[in-house]
Image (cartoon, grey):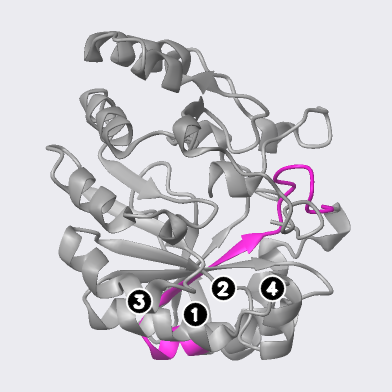
Amino acid sequence: MPVEVFGPGYEFLPKSEILTFDEIVRTVRVSVGLGVKKVRLTGGEPLLRRGVVDLVAMIATVPGVEDLAMTTNGVLLNHHAERLAAAGLGRVTVSLDALSEEVFAQMNGVGVKVNRVLLGIEAAQRHGLEVKVNMVVQRGVNETEILPLLRWCRERGVILRFIEFMDVGETNGWDLTQVVSEKEILETIGVEMPHRELGSNYRGETARRWGFADGVGEFGIISSVTRPFCGDCTRLRVSAEGKAFTCLFAGSGHDLRALLRSGKSDEDVSGFLGSFWGGRNDRYSEERGKVNQLKAEMSYLGG
């Protein structure tokens, strides 16, 4: 969230305009009836939401939810990890783009120390949460961190996933020349750590998986720019204010909140979700450079 856009004077939504925990849980319950098995809490930063541990506990009790995860910047994870695990969270994905204090400071822009994130990862592991780390690689910014971060993760049994720098939203100043491709990432890693490609765990998995030659550990690469995977996408995103989006690169969503607050039945909500999901044709990553559309920010839609 660039400080020049989301600075101290930025006016966030009043509480009345964001979904309540009960509305979120109802959305989960109805979605499970449509075949959803995995739920992920993202952000912005989900650990800033007051009472988020209670929300985790509520979702964890919904029959049919087989996998409950969270994506976080890790800054508050050390404080919350034990309670999150006890509430029923199974996995956390921590966004961490550098180990170097200098590079990390340059990228986060708010003075957070990288050690706070590392302590959060260690706390999550200590309390039994499965941990993955996501690193967005941007040319001229943090590509020198590829090997140091991979070494750190491998030593701790953490799967690191590299993400090609994407044109998410309208404020990150994206340029194709800033993209470090999957091919380049693999070449960098291969100099020190021989590897081989692994198969997918399931259809729709966003990262291609690579195992180390010695058979210990793995890493992944999400190559949405150079190898888009729109055809296998299975994700529905719901924003804090209750807009349902069928694509990370969409500019507008469907008004779920209005329906939830209209007194309609669960069957009506199910029909609403199914209607636009069944008719979706999103394929922005495959059409990149050929279409021009406004896109919602990553901090609004989550990863």
Q: Which region of the structure is painted magenta?
A: 152-174
Task: Give the percent coordinates (x, y) of residue 35.
Answer: 25, 28
Q: Is residue 236 visible?
A: no
Which one is closest to the eye, mark 1 or mark 4?
4
Q: Mark 1 = which residue?
A: 117
Q: Mark 4 = which residue?
A: 110
Decide which of 261, 251 is in the foreground and name it: 261
Query: Are the residues tagged 4 and 3 within 8 Å (C-beta)?
Result: no
Find the distance from the CA under tag 1 to the CA under tag 4. Answer: 14 Å
Write down the quadrant of residue 83 in the picture: bottom left
Task: Give the percent coordinates (x, y) of residue 252.
Answer: 63, 24
Q: Mark 3 = which residue?
A: 79
**Mark 4 is on which residue type?**
Val
In the image, is residue 7 above or below residue 21?
below
Query: Are the residues tagged 2 and 1 within 8 Å (C-beta)?
Result: yes
- Identify the residue shown where x is 66% and y is 63%: 182
Find the distance from the CA under tag 2 to the CA under tag 1. Answer: 8 Å
**Mark 2 is on which residue type?**
Leu
Find the distance from the CA under tag 2 to the CA under tag 3. Answer: 18 Å
How crowded is the residue under tag 4: few (<14 C-alpha within 10 Å), some, or many (20+)? few
Q: Secondary structure at mark 1?
A: helix
Q: Quadrant of the N terminus?
A: bottom right
Find the distance from the CA under tag 4 to the CA under tag 3. Answer: 19 Å
Direction from residue 162 to residue 264 in the image, left or right:
left
Sequence order check, earlier mark of 2 and 4: 2
Q: Mark 2 = which residue?
A: 96
**Mark 1 is on which residue type?**
Val
Write down the quadrant of residue 21 in the picture: top left
Task: Give the percent coordinates (x, y) of residue 153.
Answer: 46, 83
Sequence order check, earlier mark of 2 and 1: 2
